Each structure stands twice: as structure tokens, then as C-alpha cells.
Amino acid sequence: MSEDYLKNGKSLREDGYICTMEGMSRKDLIEEILGTHSHDYLVENGFIKKLEKFKRGCYFDGAFGWYNNTWRIIDFAQGLGWVWNEPIEHKDSEQDTDDNDLEALVQTIDEIEEWLDENTDIGENEHWCWSDGDFGLWLFDEDGEHAE
């Protein structure tokens, strides 16, 4: 027997129906929702949002230090919608943080770099990353070298 689902708070089964979408992939379900609702409805209800446009340059100056900037970058990404699935405790300093948590922070920033590249409106050959101790949006040439 299929699972019972609610439509507008009421059981489908109570109305004599069952859901036949259980075999659809997540992508297919999302595309069905996007295709059957107006753009305004999707925006108003938070299903879609406009990518934020960013200009190239430094966003987190290396003068603040790697550890402090890491936490600032995490806050920045969360403000844009990135979700930290396995957060660690924020310690006052890098010296108070154990090696496993430091490695987790490195991996977290790597994940954020990819997420920012995919979820912000950036130009061709632009990427979010560290450069000379600063974190920002930088331009790269065809060979993957900094172009600025």
C-alpha cells in the first residue's frame, strides 16, 4: 500500500486518492513543480531566487588571518543559502581548535568555494577561492592561472 500524503492538510486517501508520484526522481518532481506554478508564486514562496551578482575582487582580507576569515566565509555563505551539514564548534582561536576540526574547516571552505561558484552570478573564468591569503572572486585565464 502506498504512503498517504496530505494535500492542503487533508489526506489524499480520505478523498479516495493515492499518490502516484512516488517513483519520480527528485529532479522530476522539482521540474514538475517549476512547470506548474507561476514565476511569481515560486519567488514569493521561496522555491526559487535570483542569483546574487558579485564583482571580482577581495571579499575577506588576509590581514584578518586564515582562521578568522574561515568563519567569516562560512557566515557569508550561510547568508546566501549554503547549509552546513556537519558544523563544528567555533573556538576563540586556531590554537584552541584540534587538528580534526581544522581539517574539517579546510574541507568546509573547499565545499563553499564550489557552492559559491555554482550559486552566485559570476562571470566566465571567475572563481571563488584564496589568493595570496585573501579570499574573493578572482579571474583565471584558460590555463587556470590568475589573470589579474
Image (cartoon, rainbow, N blue to C red):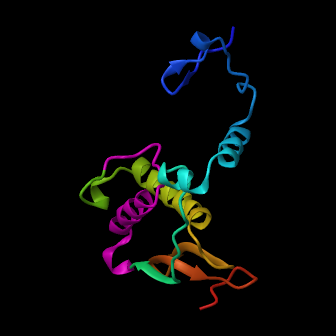
Q: Is residue 89 left or right of residue 55?
A: left
User: Residue 5: x and y, percent?
Assistant: 58, 20
Q: Is residue 75 left or right of residue 16?
A: left
Q: Is 127 or 54 nearer to us in this picture?
A: 54
Q: Residue at x 71, y 42 (%)?
A: 32
Q: Is 2 located above or below residue 69 in the figure?
A: above
Q: Is 86 located above or below residue 77 in the figure?
A: above
The stretch drawn in magenta includes residue 84: yes
User: Residue 15: x and y, percent?
Assistant: 60, 13
Toward the left, the furthest residue is 92
- Residue 128 is drawn in which quadrant? bottom right
Q: Is residue 70 left or right of residue 48?
A: left
Q: Which quadrant of the rendered structure holds the C terminus?
A: bottom right
Q: Is 116 or 130 nearer to us in this picture?
A: 116
Q: Which quadrant of the rendered structure holds the N terminus?
A: top right
User: Residue 121: x and y, percent?
Assistant: 58, 72
Q: Is residue 28 left or right of residue 99?
A: right
Q: Residue at x 47, y 49 (%)?
A: 83
Q: Residue at x 33, y 80 (%)?
A: 63
State how many labels appear.
0
User: Residue 56: x and y, percent?
Assistant: 53, 83
The stretch drawn in magenta includes residue 94: no
Q: Magenta residues, as a range?
A: 61-89
Q: Residue at x 30, y 52 (%)?
A: 90
Q: Is 101 located above or below residue 117 in the figure?
A: above
